[in-house]
Image (tube, rainbow, N blue to C red):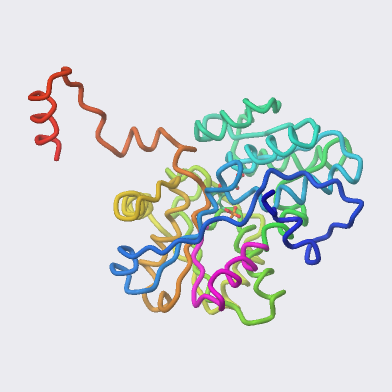
Amino acid sequence: MTVAVIERYHDRLPVSDATPVVSLGEGSTPLIAAPRLSESLGVELFLKLESMNPTSSFKDRGMTVAVSKALEAGAEAVICASTGNTAASAATYAARGGLRAVILQPAGAVALGKLAQARAVGAVVLEVMGSFDQALGAARELAERGTHALVNSLNPHRLEGQKTLAFELVEELGELPDVVALPYGGGGNTRAVGLGFEELGAGMPRVVAGQAADRAATVATAIRIADPVHRKEADAVVARSEGKVVTLSDDEILAAWRELARHEGVFCEPSSAASVAALRHAPEIAGGRVVCVITGHGLKDPRVVEQETAPPIQVDADPDAIAEAADRAA
Ligand code: AN7
């Protein structure tokens, strides 16, 4: 059986033999070389495909710990506010653990694939007439009443599970990378990566975090977060590491998204491409061995593909017509 996050890093996580482990085989994600992007960026680039986790995003590392601990504490239901991936992960791990899940999402702002995941596994999905930040405020208040366990990254168990990304990177590379680049939404992942490297005690790679210039309305809906709850701690990690927070336009994020897909065959959601876009805008920091964290799968957000790529061409079932259409499209 696959050795998942809690088993692999048992000694470094807040679990005991009494913890009922809720797992779907998360973690141990592929780390692949990116030769073409390496050349165009002038670095040795690797991509950590967190999109290959059970619910196709990086959230599963923390969620396995948070839901296991919620079950251990006797919770019957979990709640989260989410731009989509936390929701898909929370809903799925709740189903796996036999818990109810209540999902709060900003109305009309969650990518199709993520919503499909939460619905398919039976979560109660509520559309809040407001922003992510407003939905999170409401979730926190409700959780304080004690009826629902909050599994947003304000839950410290989420960060604990998430920090295992740093452990894997060092094990797989055999040394510390020089730079880790990742998207910056609420800042939980940036904070957790810092926590992981600090626990290892072997030094800190420069952390480059890409955020959307228009946080409230970016095409990268996963990081459509106006007021990051972890801003102070995430910014502190970046500063301590001598890295940089890079602010990106939607065009810059989409250009990196296309590059990843067309030049490396890595189809991610737009938010994930903010890591690569940020590297491009921080040449003074991006050098040596660099890891970009690919946080979410491209299938999460099919609408962006519809908007950003040419539609299929209709053709008769005739070889001449097919050859002609293929030549014209090339
Ligand atoms: C693909 O699901 O906030 O900086 O509610 O889905 O740790 O917030 C998602 C965030 C990057 C940003 N990439 O990470 C949610 C949510 C993807 C994401 C981020 C998210 P943080």
Whole-percent x and y of residue 102? Answer: 73, 31
Left/right of residue 312 with respect to residue 254 in the rendered view: left
Magenta region, residue range = 164-183
252, 198: nearer the viewer = 198
Q: Is residue 197 above or below residue 114?
A: below
Left/right of residue 112 with respect to residue 54 in the rendered view: left
Residue at the image point whose x is 31% and y is 54% from the top? 259
Q: Is residue 167 above or below residue 218?
A: below
Whether 82 is among the magenta residues is: no
Q: Quadrant of residue 318?
A: top left
Whole-percent x and y of residue 243? Answer: 51, 75
Whole-percent x and y of residue 74? Answer: 91, 40
Whole-percent x and y of residue 131? Answer: 59, 39
Callout count = 0
View extreme (front): residue: 1
Left/right of residue 257 with respect to residue 144 in the rendered view: left
